[in-house]
Image (cartoon, rainbow, N blue to C red):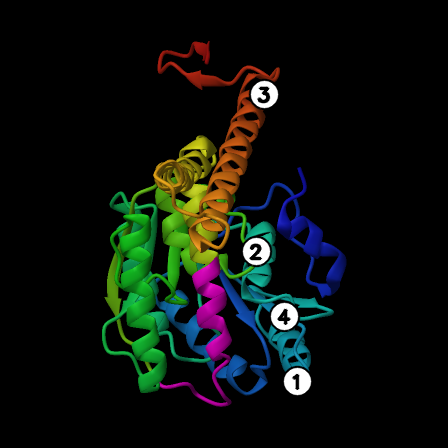
Amino acid sequence: MTRPGDQLASDLTAAVPRPLPGTAKPDVSVILPSYNEAENLTPVVEELVARLDEAHLTHEILIVDDGSRDGTRRISAELASTYAGVRAIRLRRNVGKSGAVQLGLGLATGRRVVLMDADGQDDAAAIPRMLELLDDGLDLVTGRRADRQDRFVKRSTSKLYNAMTSWVTGVEGHDFNSGLKAMTRDVADSLELYGELHRYIPVLAAWNGFAVGELDVDHRPRLHGETKFKRSRFWRGFFDLVTVKFLTTYTARPFHLFGGIGFALSAIGSGILAWLLFSKITGHNLGDRPALFAGVILLLVGVQLLSVGLLAELIVHFRNTSPRQAQYVDGGDGDWTST
């Protein structure tokens, strides 16, 4: 199956080649998705390199230029030629943050991966502590922006979004959409991001069985330029929340969703029609009763949803019973056991 990051590879115009096979993997790969951030990239990368060098971490920094129309391409190339660990990647067109992050995850070679915004608001000083939490047993650490330096509207909508996400998905968290995240290689390899799914990386990681947590970090005002946040992103994020809920809850049992809704609608429609039948028997005229049309429509839609749920269950069943190669796990004594 083609991963979203693989499909984006056709949009590349320039990329610094990956390290040759056999070379040591860096301690950490930092992915900087960038869209019209030419003024911010140089100070952000300089600070990032200094912090990682202070912590004695071997590193690579991937600047993913998401189809910028300013000087981001030129600045990225200059930084790549200045610092040995910086790699510049450019997309011909803007595919969105999720697509840029997915591409960066596919090209990263580090044992651990850090996601970071390129606007200067994330404090690189928090990265070593986040990596320590990974060593202590967490698989994904999100930098919680305890004191956000953003506009009131953005802070308010973010609080609503985080509360709704936690309630709908059941994953505890206060800052799901923070741009600063650290994760293990296993988490990075498990992600498939598209649309606005970068907002739900902690939810996707938790669904895959990884341990997730948060760390309070400093948040700073944007260095230069304007925020990319638009009101439409809130609504797109809401629809993607529905997508994430479906993917993490009902992909293995779709009849629970479609069948539940279909059964409820059918029950309501049947109840209305039964009441109308009784009214007809008792001599009332039904020809101009809106309830008759409502009852019929609810019953038909309910039956259709029940049918869709059953068909979806058949698809899941055939997918799970199709021939698959045996998987093996290390038994701990050198023997391999088929599962």
Quarter of the image that includes the N terminus: top right
Find the distance from the CA under tag 2 to the CA under tag 3: 26 Å
Q: Secondary structure at mark 4?
A: strand
Amino acid type for the residue under numbered disc 1: Gly
Find the distance from the CA under tag 3 to the CA under tag 4: 39 Å
Amino acid type for the residue under numbered disc 4: Asp
Find the distance from the CA under tag 3 to the CA under tag 1: 51 Å
Q: Secondary structure at mark 3?
A: helix
What residue sits right under mark 1 in the picture?
Answer: 71
Find the distance from the CA under tag 4 to the CA under tag 2: 14 Å
Amino acid type for the residue under numbered disc 2: Tyr
Look at discs 4 and 1 and give the one toward the viewer. 4
Q: Secondary structure at mark 1?
A: loop
Residue 231 part of the magenta-drawn span: yes
What residue sits right under mark 2 in the picture?
Answer: 194
- Measured from the top left, where is residue 173 in percent x and y? 26, 57
Tell me which label, 4 or 1, sits earlier in the chain.
4
State if disc 3 and disc 2 touch (CB < 8 Å). Answer: no
- Measured from the top left, where is residue 307 in percent x and y? 54, 31
Amino acid type for the residue under numbered disc 3: Phe
What residue sits right under mark 3 in the picture?
Answer: 318
Q: Nearer the viewer, residue 93 or 186?
A: 93
Find the distance from the CA under tag 2 to the CA under tag 1: 26 Å
Tell me which label, 2 or 3, sits earlier in the chain.
2
Picture quadrant of residue 263: top left
- Measured from the top left, where is residue 245 in percent x and y? 41, 48
Q: Which residue is pictured at 38% across the width and 56% down the height?
A: 182
Q: Residues within 10 Å of mark 4 (few under 14, many from 20)?
A: many
Residue 142 part of the magenta-drawn span: no
What residue sits right under mark 4 in the picture?
Answer: 66
